Image (cartoon, helix red, strand yellow):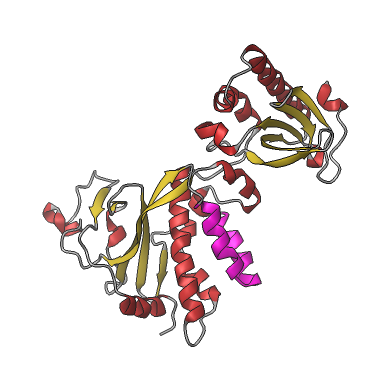
């Protein structure tokens, strides 16, 4: 088998077997893994690359002295995996032999079922990436506030205020202040509310103040602002202990987790265009949101177990800078 005949990877250097000139190469990767390189720009793979947990990047061909870009399908060590990779390589070679001008997007789409047998890593969906990106935008705003506050507020206080990582009812909470981060792909400030109680004070804290941090994020593959951008703005600002805790918590986000070790896999995921600038709104006092008393008898129907509705924040005045500062102090237990 050709894969077995390849020399093991030494540092970042690989002996590659070219299956289709300028399109397809097979190599042994780190840790006895096997890699299939599909040459092409990030854009050439289109939406077919989204959600597949694949890697993409620039490479250098030492034998030909050329630079190239490629998507990489990497499989771990194991006899079954090697056989699957051999089958994937054969199928890719066959497809390009029969249609040499086949686009990278179509090629990847046709190879999808074989790739899914090899790749078992779990990634956040685009919707989950949008939600986490929104939370990291607010996290970044709190970090800026904490660092500029006199006296200085440690970034661990910001980390402790972030509760959305474990699918908590609140995204940020502390000292009877709750902030729900709502990112929408629409062109207006219209957000999904689920469950119904999400915008209402906690029944055990009737004086809780509830806010929505609203922003518009529309998926767009041409945008340079991505989940990785938001992550890289936050992570370097944390001290060593906070970084360790942040890593642990974000790895559980959304029940799937953002695996920092898979950052290179998220390069192929779409970025986001900001259609609505971030703004903060107090919502618990709004008279026209859904509440238990909105229903006959003061409670939702007994058999209605998953109440979800859309709320529009259009036309509402956002919280002003001075009030926002007081709110952040309270949220971070600085007052």
At which x and y percent is residue 239? 62, 72
Q: Is residue 64 left or right of residue 205?
A: right
Q: Nearer the viewer, residue 160 or 13?
A: 13
- Position of the C terminus by quadrant: bottom left
Is residue 237 magenta-colored? yes
Place residue 42 in its image quadrant: top right
Range of residues picked out in magenta: 225-251
Residue at point 56% right, 51% down? 258
- Position of the N terminus by quadrant: top right
At which x and y percent is residue 256? 53, 47
At which x and y percent is residue 280? 32, 66
Residue at point 64% right, 71% down? 241
Judge whether 22 appears above or below 276 on screen: above
Residue at point 42% right, 66% down? 172
Main secondary structure of the magenta stretch: helix
Judge whether 78 appears above or below 174 on screen: above
Observer able to see residue 202: no
Q: Nearer the viewer, residue 305 or 43?
A: 43
Place residue 167 in its image quadrant: bottom left
Q: Is residue 166 left or right of residue 41?
A: left
Observer able to see residue 197: yes
At which x and y percent is residue 217? 39, 51
Q: Is residue 45 left or right of residue 278?
A: right
Judge whether 130 appears above or below 42 on screen: below
Residue at point 52% right, 69% down? 159
Q: Residue reaching furthest left?
A: 296
Is residue 192 magenta-colored? no
């Amino acid at each position: 088998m050709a894969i077995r005949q390849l020399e093991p990877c030494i540092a970042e250097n690989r002996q590659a077997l070219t299956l289709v000139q300028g399109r397809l190469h097979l190599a042994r990767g780190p840790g006895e893994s096997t890699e299939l390189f599909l040459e092409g720009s990030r854009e050439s793979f289109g939406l077919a690359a989204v959600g597949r947990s694949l890697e993409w990047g620039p490479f250098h061909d030492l034998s030909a002295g050329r630079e190239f870009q490629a998507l990489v399908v990497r499989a771990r060590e194991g006899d079954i995996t090697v056989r699957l990779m051999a089958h994937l390589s054969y199928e890719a070679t066959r497809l390009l032999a029969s249609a040499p001008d086949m686009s990278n997007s179509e090629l990847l789409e046709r190879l999808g079922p074989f790739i899914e047998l090899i790749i078992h890593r779990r990634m956040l969906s685009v919707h989950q990436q949008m939600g986490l990106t929104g939370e990291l935008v607010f996290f970044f705003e709190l970090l800026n506030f904490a660092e500029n506050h006199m006296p200085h507020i440690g970034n661990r206080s910001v980390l402790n205020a972030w509760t959305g990582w474990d699918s908590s009812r609140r995204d940020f909470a502390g000292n009877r202040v709750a902030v729900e981060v709502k990112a929408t792909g629409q062109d207006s400030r219209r957000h999904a509310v689920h469950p119904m109680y999400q915008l209402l004070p906690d029944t055990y804290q009737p004086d809780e103040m509830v806010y929505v941090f609203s922003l518009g994020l529309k998926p767009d593959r041409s945008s340079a602002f991505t989940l990785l951008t938001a992550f890289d703005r936050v992570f370097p600002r944390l001290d060593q202990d906070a970084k360790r805790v942040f890593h642990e918590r974000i790895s559980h986000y959304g029940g799937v987790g953002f695996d920092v070790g898979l950052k290179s896999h998220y390069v192929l995921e779409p970025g986001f265009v900001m259609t609505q600038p971030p703004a903060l709104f107090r919502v618990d006092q709004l008279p026209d949101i859904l509440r238990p008393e909105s229903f006959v008898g003061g409670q939702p129907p007994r058999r209605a177990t998953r109440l979800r509705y859309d709320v529009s924040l259009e036309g509402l005045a956002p919280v002003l800078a001075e009030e926002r500062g007081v709110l952040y102090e309270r949220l971070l237990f600085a007052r």
